[in-house]
Amino acid sequence: MQYFISHYNKESELKFPDDLIIYDTTLRDGEQTPGVCFSFEEKLEIARKLDKFKIHQIEAGFPIVSEKEKETVKAIASEGLDADIIALTRTKPGDIDAALDCDVDGIITFVGTSDIHLDHKMHITRQDAINLCETAVDYAKDHGLYVAFSAEDATRTDIDFLKRIYSKAEECGADRVHIADTTGAITPQGIDYLVRELVKDLKVMLALHCHNDFGLAVINSITGVLAGAGGISTTVNGLGERAGNASLEELVMALKILYGKDYGFKTKYIKEISDMVSKASGLPIPYNKPVVGNNVFRHESGIHVDAVIEEPLCYEPYVPELVGQKRQLVLGKHSGCRAVRAKLNECELDVTDDELIEIVKQVKKSREEGKYINDKVFKEIVKNTKG
């Protein structure tokens, strides 16, 4: 048994698409995390690992930003990866030409659509935005690219205007349109309503690019898919501007374990990818980060450890090997005889029952004094107890 989850999950009838597309934007939006700048070699390494994980599409970068960025995107596109390689562009022919020079499979081209973006960022009218969308999608399709059109700040955009601009993109041959929840400002109920309204009038695939300002990026993505969307944007470790984007590892494991939807991802590489991106970004993974945090499969509390030793799924919803993690029994002030005995066996140390009781006392005391009970400290405690 690899996992054990709530049986109530199956009480609701849910319909997921058979061919959900996950496109990862760690190398583009993830790099827009303040202070993060991946090197050429790091981007290539991350792209290769994402491909090994079997990600469907990799958003490799924003070629117009710099010659170095363009060179990196082109190198990733030349790797011969199974994943489709896409690049970000504004709705400008020059941006699209830069992407074409990189030999990418497709582009995501975007324009702000909310009134606040149109008035204060773009300084254009709604009709101007529609014209930009039309020009960009036509130009990219004429050059043989896969085209996704993204409405920036879509979740704060008037729905009638959203329908108009998405319809124009569809009319021009866009392969996909994106709902960008640019400030993470929508609720799961809101995204459910928005997607259901849009799919009434659109035949083109809808995809979701959710930010995590309120911690809702993953559930908003899943809710949007259940409402009729067919694609989700993610980043490794949830990197991205401000609070980041929908976390690749959290999304994939929620789909696989909680919802029973396996889209073919090689989840055993999740921890490797997470550690790689953490090192490259210079951002440590919080110990309590779902799926990849160091504490996710660590157990200290005595009553918990006793159960975990007998059956790990008492306190784990799935086994750590599914995501490339390992289970750890940690000794501390909450540890009991069974946990200490397990550690003794692991260290190949034999003690009497009386010595075991004393070792447990010394472990608790040492931890309360502020010492971390690693193997070295533990062996010292055992040595002193045995005399």
Image: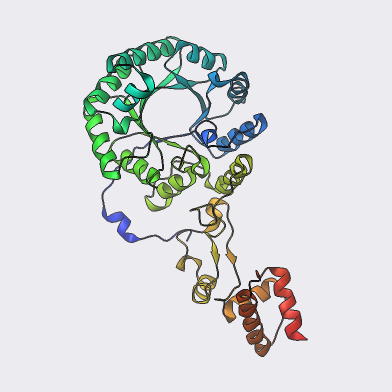
Asked where in the image residue 117 lies, by quadrant, the reply is: top left
Quadrant of the image containing the C terminus: bottom right
- Point 65% across, 77% down: residue: 366
Q: Look at the picture and state if 42 lies above or below 271.
A: above
The relative height of residue 345 versus residue 5 in the rendered view (above or below) is: below
Q: Nearer the viewer, residue 254 or 127?
A: 127
Residue positioned most to the bottom = 354
Q: How many marks?
A: 0
Q: Position of residue 187 (x, y in %)?
A: 30, 43
Q: Is residue 348 visible?
A: no
Q: Nearer the viewer, residue 318 or 98?
A: 98
Picture coordinates of residue 198, whole percent (x, y): 25, 30
Q: Residue furthest front?
A: 120
| Res. 367 visible in picture | yes
Which quarter of the figure has residue 180? top left
Query: Seen from this angle, which residue lies furthest right?
Result: 387
Q: Looking at the picture, does residue 213 appear above or below residue 148?
A: below
Q: Tell me: 142 left or right of 193.
A: right
Q: Nearer the viewer, residue 214 or 141?
A: 214
Residue drawn at (25%, 20%) of the image: 164
> What colour-coding does the image apply?
rainbow
In the displayed structure, 387 sits above or below 167; it is below
Q: Quadrant of residue 378?
A: bottom right
Residue 116 screen position, x and y as percent? 32, 27
User: Residue 126 in the image: x percent, y percent?
Assistant: 28, 18
